[in-house]
Image: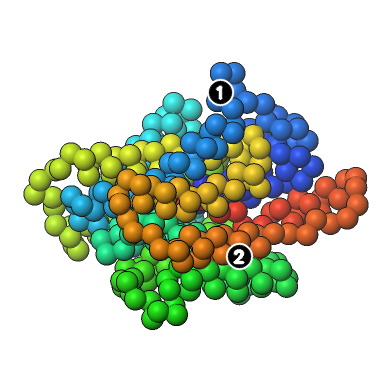
Amino acid sequence: MSITAARRNASASSAAEAASPATDSTADRAAPPSSPAAPRPGALDWRIRFVILCLIWGLSFLFIKVGTDGYAPLNVSLGRMVFGSAVLVAVLAVKRQRLPRAGRTWAHLLVAAFFLNALPFTLFAYAETTITSTLAGICNATSPLWGMALSLVALSEDRPTRRRFAGLGLGFIGVLTVLGAWQGFSGQDPAGTAMALVAAVSYAVGWIYVRRTLTGTGDSNLSLAGAQLLVGTAQLAVATPLFSHFPRSFPLVPLLAIAALGALGTGVAFLMQYGLVAEVGPTTAMLVTYFTPVIATAAGVTLLGERLTWNTPVGAVIVLAGAALTQSRRRPAGTGPQHAAEQAEEAEKAEKTEPAGR
């Protein structure tokens, strides 16, 4: 999925969500901003789609692990982008939406695609050659922590609070717990773990960059996401021959895992997230982030036979609790239009997470 697009969804629908969950202001202008978006006739209930989205993003780390069993990490990330781009381009064609036209927008997308797709996708693929998919999924869950820390420096309107600082500290205690810091990080590959954490930082950098440069371009979220994936695919298409080798064989199971990773985790998942944001609002939709490491852990242990010690689930719970605190906002008191405007302003400042690397 395109994390840029999920983040843009959150920003675009924030004003409408001030009074109640509403449609995305860019994609569905027909619905009144004060009422929730009506589900399409025959569409699955949003709760079912929410569960499916959690499963897709949680299983993404399993797909990466299986994919790297048969292909080089750069080939995995390139294949992921190719399949994900194909899904979004097909949807763009069906909906008759065009890609952005402004050269300035494409220049910003070049940076966004690097930090939100090409770099983290590749780092996670390399990381999972030496660490478990469970640990990779938990490292991914630290993205909101890095985002909060960086936003305090990069976003002047993102005011720190005691609660958010407490969440930041709690989250990093959780990271140390997962890694078994009191044992000297024994049993964990330092390089692989570092790459997974840098990938999470890369997402945070990309989110902040998008907030500062790609809001209010006039292009739809779907158009921006499709363009971003195409740019990321081009970046990896250039880098892969330079730093990796072309596959000499094409093992079927790893290839299917890469196809599922791209088509489902990077393509279909974005579309589902897009619909959830429009129907129930970004606050509810972002809760997917907190289920992703749970699914990743369950899949790694049950399907891949990965070893699980007590500190991994305990640390993961602490990480998620800290991440939740960093995203919490105190609701302003009062009612009426002024209250709605204040809520809209707070929602617009809030950072919503997608899994991204998902």
Q: Residue at x 63, y 26 (%)?
A: 39
Q: Residue 161 in the image: state x and y as whole percent.
A: 73, 71
Helix, strand or loop status at disc 2: helix
Q: Which mark is residue 322?
A: 2
Q: Is residue 29 visible to the viewer in this orientation of the structure?
A: no
Q: Mark 1 highlights which residue?
A: 43
Quarter location, residue 88: top left
Relative to 113, 255 lies left or right? left
- Pick whichever of labels 1 and 2 is earlier in the sequence: 1
Tell me which amino acid carries mark 2: Gly
Quadrant of the image containing the N terminus: top left
Applied colour scheme: rainbow
Q: Is residue 352 visible to the viewer in this orientation of the structure?
A: yes
Q: Give the label, 1 or 2, closer to the camera.
A: 2
Q: Residue at x 75, y 55 (%)?
A: 345
Q: Residue 178 in the image: state x and y as whole percent.
A: 45, 68
Helix, strand or loop status at disc 1: loop
Q: Residue at x 83, y 47 (%)?
A: 340
Q: Residue 106 in the image: state x and y as whole percent.
A: 44, 52
Residues at marks 1 and 2, CA–CA distance in whole angstroms: 34 Å
Relative to 34, 318 lies left or right? left
Crowding around mark 1 (Cα neighbors within 10 Å: few <14, some 14 to 19, many 20+) is few
Outermost residue, front side: 310
Tell me which amino acid carries mark 1: Ala
Q: Residue 149 in the image: state x and y as whole percent.
A: 58, 71
